[in-house]
Image (spheres, grey):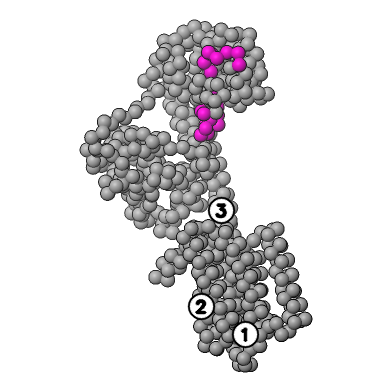
Amino acid sequence: MINKINQYLFRSPDEIGFDNYLILIICFLITVLGFLGTLTNLALRLNWQVITSTTIPSIIFLLLYLYSRIKGRYIVSKYVIIISCIILLNYQWFINYGSEGPVIFLFVVLETFILIFFNKPTKNIFTIFLLLNISILFLIEYYNPLIVNDYPSEFARLIDLYVGVLIYLLISVFFVNTAIKFYIREQEKAQLADKLKSAFLANMSHEIRTPMNGILGFADLLKNPNLTGDEQQQYIRIIEKSGARMLNIINDIVDTSKIEAGLMKVEIKESDINEQLEYIYTFFKPEVEAKGVKIFCKSTLPAKEAILKTDREKLFAILTNLVKNAIKYTNQGSIEFGYTKKGNSIEFYVKDTGIGIPKDRQAAIFERFIQADISDKTAHQGAGLGLSITKAYIEMLGGKIWVVSEVGSGSIFYFTLPYNFEPGKKIIIQKDNPAEKTEIHITNLKILIAEDDETSEKLISIMVKEFGKELLKAQTGIEAVEIFRDNPDTDLILMDIQMPGMSGYEATRQIRQFNGKVIIIAQTAYGLSGDREKAIEAGCNDYISKPINRAELLAIIHKHFMN
């Protein structure tokens, strides 16, 4: 009950920040203390000026509390608090018995507030101003002792000083103690982050070296001239599988970087969730059954209602990540995934009978670079990025994710997405399958390959040689422009973006100054959001990211030369 009241009154420091959290507490405390001070002054029968000196701050800081709590504009409140306190303290100095009263202690509390809440040079400016202000007040009282009032009795003076010192001491202790706790917690977070970073680097080293070992090791074995055809094909499949695994790791890191940089975009399309679940079921079934585990897929909506307006690719990635996660940690029993409609949302679930997740790790698994077992005692594959990416995708799409799990009994991952189906509307599901367009009937193209990496240039040359009558090669952007200028009949340029001397973007811009017809396809190893837009803006006709997929490249060429 107390935690709920505290959360409602002051929010959480993790949610709004430590400084803002303290601002709410300060405003609330001064409001309460001002009210109590007013009652004390009334009980002591002090003059009306003293009574108003506590009533006015109570009203001002109540308004500041409400403004900060409702509007959330804490920076404004912070400066208003300082300025109001200085004005009120000067007012109280003269009506609340000057240096003989408790006001003097409030200057100490105010300086504590300044030191905690402000950075240089603002902190230094306020501190110097406060010291000058106090000095001036003492000088005024020294030369004009009658300007301040006298207590009606010694008893009233002692009680007022005692209550004032006690209250202000408690406030100072609270400020300093709260700040110390906060900084200790931040230090612990930093230490945990350092530990996680070390664990992540060690894990990444393992994750990258393992598939690299498969790639380099079996590539070396392929040199053996005595291999049979079946052995060669087996080794090639292992190399492909290892390469795909390493690419998945790199893609996870790139996706995480996009999310952190705010570059990840959402493309809303109509998506048939029954079809997506069926595809995932068909895709993973052989892998699951090979482990001796059963897999089930449950769809509850009829085909005509199983439509969401969402980012189809991100939904597919979310479901794939969760199912892959279930497969990874389930060695017996079953895996089940599906969804149910609940009000205005669809609640998806992925259930397994795997190893389960400890209670104290269930929140942490959605953080970046964290697995349920940081020390990786179970030696499961994974960089600890999949669930953090999944969580970010779900939040981008307007949903939320949570897990219910028991160690040894398995886990159920739930996530929701808004259900925005419109009955009676004609639904057109877009399906892009570049592989269906890979049959190329194009020949006699003159192609310029601008690529500074020898391996990439060799690979692209092999991919396009079947329909190229002549291949030209450039290793720099400057060379690409010069070669094209000497060969204006070139049909296609495959332009690497990152080249020495001149980037592919600039080379494209220079080529477009004297030729606007040649087809230029940008190719880059960056694969970041916005690369396609940059390429098109520079003058490229299309874009492809590395590692280049042959079917995708041929589909792009087909699009530009067969239409």
Whole-number angstrom distance, CA of label 1 to CA of label 3 = 47 Å
Residue 328 position within the rendered picture, expressed as x and y whole percent measured from the top left: 40, 43
Mark 1 element type: helix
Tag shown at residue 193: 3
- Give, as a three-letter code, the residue at label 1: Leu
Residue 225 versus residue 320 in the image, above or below: above
Between 211 and 164, the one lying in front of the other is: 164
Tag shown at residue 35: 2
Residue 375 versus residue 157 in the image, above or below: above
Between 504 and 425, the one lying in front of the other is: 425
- Give, as a three-letter code, the residue at label 2: Phe
Residue of label 1: 161
Residue shown at the point (54%, 47%) measured from the top left: 200
Residue extent of the magenta highlight = 513-533
Residue shown at the point (42%, 46%) measured from the top left: 395
Please say whether residue 520 is one of the residues in the magenta stretch.
yes
